[in-house]
Image: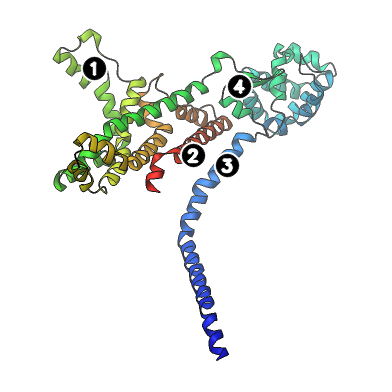
Amino acid sequence: MADVAAAVYAAPENTARQVARSRRIEMRKGLLLLAPALLFLCFTFLLPLGYIVRLSVYDPTVHDGLPRTVEALQSWSGSGAPDEQTFLALANDLIDARNAATIGAIANRLNVEAAGLRSAFTSAARRLSQKPPDDHYSEWFQKSDPVWGEQATWQAINQLRSAISANYYLAAVDLRRSASGIELAPEENRIHTTLFARTFLVAFSVTALCIILGYPVAYLIATSSKLVGSIMIVLVLLPFWTSLLVRTTGWIVLLQSQGVLNDLFVYLGIISDENRVRMIYNLAGTLIAMTHILLPFFILPLYSVMVSIPPLYMRAAQSLGAHRFYAFWRVYFPNTLSGVGSGALLAFILAVGYYITPALVGGQSGQMISNIIAFHVQSSLNWGLAAALGMILLSVVLILYAVYHRYSGANYLVN
């Protein structure tokens, strides 16, 4: 009898163990199924992201290329030219760098910090390799090029003496190091903060235009008959079947001064032939083209939410005496906020990183931060600064997403 009672009491415990074991098995199976996707994510996103982070803070060019000079500059006061020993250390480093064929990389990196240093470094290295002076190195350097006697030259070397620094991030927000500390860069070099502000202004503007234009379209598709809704969905999806480059080029044809729209305005007498509207190669062209391209990304998530809202909600509100618009505003619209938030977030994130459209139709006033990142990667080859700009952009987007996720009313509706 006691054995039977013990078995009865042990049965729930054994069942709980079996359930826990089956759950662990299912979890392991799920992880195995997710393994290819996780590996793909690691190799295509996490590893490149880690490399970009490394590029943005790690710069050993001067630290490894001019080791004696870097060590000698530790005792430099920060004003005027350094002492004779520092010039001697620089001479030895330049000779070694020329023999190791690294002088070009060192000169290019320093030329980014202070224009004109490339020629000074390469010329001094060539002359030192041919016939170095017996003594008075400081006098020899300053006679060969007055730039060696300038404080700015040595500040540029000194601020790059560490292999790990935040110099790229400072440059990305138009700041720089000086003898007195961190200060604003010269006014003619302050372009990054302006581009960041323009990028987020354009992204918010495009998102707002997508909401204004896309909400009625999504509502019309969701509330139309099945045939009409299917036709409209095809029309919304049609741009996805056309190359982005073709769509952007189409806007150039439509918006240019001698384009279709201006010709139509002139024909209708809205404007004169001499006063054609400039709608391309400026900020207006960027807004128009980007809104057209990103509109489907807003409409489709919103439509998927709208189509799941039962029509009887509106009919019930109206049967209780609510006006159609009041019923829409108090009953239907709150249920679509999750779709509005998802579509707006998708359009905003895509707009922040857009490159091709601003490059083709933006002109000078329509360029965004993605264009300057591409310039540093492809033309100036300043990959460290490009990486810092990209990381700042990513960080701001993640912060905005976290704020949206925390305070979005859509979360409360879903929960």
Q: Is residue 28 visible?
A: yes
Compared with 299, 24 (above or below) is: below
Q: Residue furthest front?
A: 320
User: Which one is earlier in the sequence, the residue at label 3 or at label 1?
Assistant: 3
User: Which one is earlier in the sequence, the residue at label 4 or at label 1?
Assistant: 4
Crowd tier of the residue under label 4, counting other residues whose Cα lies within 10 Å: few below 14, some 14–19, many 20 or above: many
Q: Residue 175, labelled with which disc?
A: 4
Q: Secondary structure at mark 1?
A: loop
User: In whole angstroms, how far apart are the C-alphas of marks 3 and 1?
Assistant: 46 Å
Q: Nearer the viewer, mark 4 or mark 1?
A: 4
Q: In the shown orientation, is residue 403 left or right of residue 120?
A: left
**Residue type indicated by callout 3:** Tyr
**Residue type indicated by callout 1:** Gln
Instruction: List the residue tagged with mark 2.
Output: 402
Q: In the shown orientation, is residue 171 left or right of residue 367?
A: right
User: Which one is earlier in the sequence, the residue at label 2 or at label 3?
Assistant: 3
Instruction: List the residue tagged with mark 1.
Output: 258
User: In whole angstroms, how far apart are the C-alphas of marks 4 and 3?
Assistant: 24 Å
Crowd tier of the residue under label 2, counting other residues whose Cα lies within 10 Å: few below 14, some 14–19, many 20 or above: few
Nearer to us in this view, 170 or 280? 170
**Residue type indicated by callout 4:** Leu
Q: Secondary structure at mark 2?
A: helix
**Percent position of residue 15, x then y:** 50, 76
Q: Residue at x 67, y 32 (%)?
A: 165
Q: Residue at x 75, y 11 (%)?
A: 143
